[in-house]
């Protein structure tokens, strides 16, 4: 007998669960902490990715898609974010309560280290500020972080995060970084996976393009210290538009952090022969792969491991990771970075830890 039959809508609906947890965020956080604890207990004994197969989907079930959340990190920054991507899910599930990053811990540490005391940093694909806000805190006096983001939803959240944290040294540009100025770019896909492509005409769904070199000249910037690009396949076109900037000598040329992904890059002959790496190498850069978790993972005390690209293990299902390129290893703080060989850039709990686990 169904004792709730006479009033079924009052009991056990998904809406009622989400409503209660929205009203009682402490209860939501307790449930998430319990799920993370279960995940960590069982993960060592299975080759399944329990974040994707167990705890993550359950959290997706518990919270409203596209609802807004806020979370503070260990350096005092507060982030508002929309629950609309895996990045948002990982941040909501982060342990400890005040993590030191939003997404990809070692990539965050990399750009913070390279940006400390810098004058100008360019970020293509700024999202809601998951890296830009950290960069803004460590720039030299008078330094600026120049952000490029196309999604109107992400732009709104990025600007609210800057306002809420009192950050005034970030310039937000609703333009697409590309090889040339004056073409129209549109986004294919949603949120953090929206891929840029050439649009046919000027309309509400397309955005003007800007090359890095043109932007640098237009702003009168004498030096760019770091360029970070996470624009879902548009990285090569963006670097093609930075020929002058990348041609500067060591000590003047920017350090580079760029995403590369098998979904839009042919690396069958190795990373060195991809068009993205070949361009950087041609300009005098040494290129490494950043070993990182694609998630929010406590990595305090562990060095950022950079894999020499010719020895990086990149076989397996289509996947992506971040590259770091410099013209001099002197740019890499030895207290932060270490150079390694013969391992995968992908840090994964559910795969062979000799290949996919941190070495330090």
Image: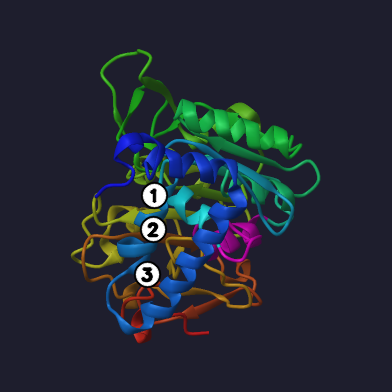
Q: Is residue 98 found inside the magenta-colored segment of the image?
A: yes
Front-lying residue, 235 or 180: 235
* Residue occupied by mark 1: 60
> Is residue 111 found left or right of 7 in the rendered image?
right
Q: In which quarter of the image is residue 73?
A: bottom right
For the residues bearing labels 2 and 1, Cβ distance under 8 angstroms = yes
Disc 2 from disc 1: Cα separation? 6 Å
Front-lying residue, 10 or 41: 10
Instruction: Tell me the crowding category of disc 1: few under 14, some 14 to 19, or many 20 or more residues within 10 angstroms, Cα based.
Output: some
Tell me where residue 169 appears, x and y as whole percent. Answer: 72, 37
Tell me where residue 118 appears, x and y as whole percent. Answer: 70, 51
Which residues make up the magenta segment? 95-115
Q: Quadrant of residue 170?
A: top right
Instruction: Tell me the crowding category of disc 2: few under 14, some 14 to 19, or many 20 or more residues within 10 angstroms, Cα based.
Output: many
* Numbered label attached to residue 94: none
Above or below for 188 versus 342: above
Residue at image location 29% in from the left, 40% down from the top: 5
Mark nearer the N terminus (1 vs 3): 1
Tell me where residue 299 appears, x and y as whole percent. Answer: 57, 72
Front-lying residue, 107 or 256: 107
Q: Is mark 3 on a helix, strand or loop?
A: loop
One can see residue 35 in this view: yes
* Residue occupied by mark 3: 346
Residue at image location 31% in from the left, 78% down from the top: 351
Residue at image location 41% in from the left, 71% down from the top: 39
Tell me where residue 61 appears, x and y as whole percent. Answer: 37, 48
* Residue occupied by mark 2: 56
């Amino acid at each position: 007998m169904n004792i709730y039959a006479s009033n079924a809508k009052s009991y056990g609906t998904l809406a009622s669960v989400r409503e209660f947890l929205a009203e009682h965020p402490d209860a939501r956080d307790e449930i998430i902490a319990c799920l993370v604890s279960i995940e960590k207990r069982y993960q060592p004994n299975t080759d399944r990715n329990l974040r994707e197969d167990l705890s993550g989907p359950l959290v997706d079930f518990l919270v409203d898609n596209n609802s807004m959340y806020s979370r503070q990190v260990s350096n005092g920054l507060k982030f508002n974010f929309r629950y609309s991507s895996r990045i948002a899910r990982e941040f909501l599930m982060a342990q400890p309560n005040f993590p030191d990053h939003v997404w990809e811990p070692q990539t965050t540490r990399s750009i913070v280290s390279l940006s400390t005391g810098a004058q100008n940093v360019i970020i293509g694909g700024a999202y809601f500020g998951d890296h830009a806000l950290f960069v803004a805190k460590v720039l030299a006096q008078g330094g600026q972080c120049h952000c490029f983001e196309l999604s109107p939803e992400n732009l709104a959240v990025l600007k609210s995060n800057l306002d809420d944290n009192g950050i005034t040294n970030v310039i937000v540009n609703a333009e697409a970084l590309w090889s040339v100025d004056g073409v129209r770019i549109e986004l294919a896909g949603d949120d953090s996976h929206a891929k840029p492509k050439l649009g046919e005409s000027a309309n509400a769904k397309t955005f003007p393009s800007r090359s890095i070199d043109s932007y640098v000249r237009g702003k009168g910037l004498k030096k760019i210290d770091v360029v970070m690009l996470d624009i879902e396949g548009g990285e090569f076109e963006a670097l093609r538009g930075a020929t002058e900037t990348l041609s500067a000598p060591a000590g003047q040329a920017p350090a580079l952090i760029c995403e590369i992904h098998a979904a839009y890059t042919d690396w069958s002959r190795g990373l060195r022969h991809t068009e993205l790496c070949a361009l950087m190498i041609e300009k005098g850069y040494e290129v490494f792969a950043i070993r990182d978790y694609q998630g929010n993972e406590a990595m305090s005390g562990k060095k950022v491991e950079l894999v020499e690209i010719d020895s990086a293990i990149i076989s397996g299902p289509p996947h992506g990771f971040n590259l770091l390129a410099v013209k001099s290893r002197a740019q890499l703080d030895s207290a932060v970075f270490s150079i390694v060989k013969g391992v995968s850039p992908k840090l994964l709990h559910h795969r062979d830890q000799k290949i996919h686990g941190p070495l330090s």
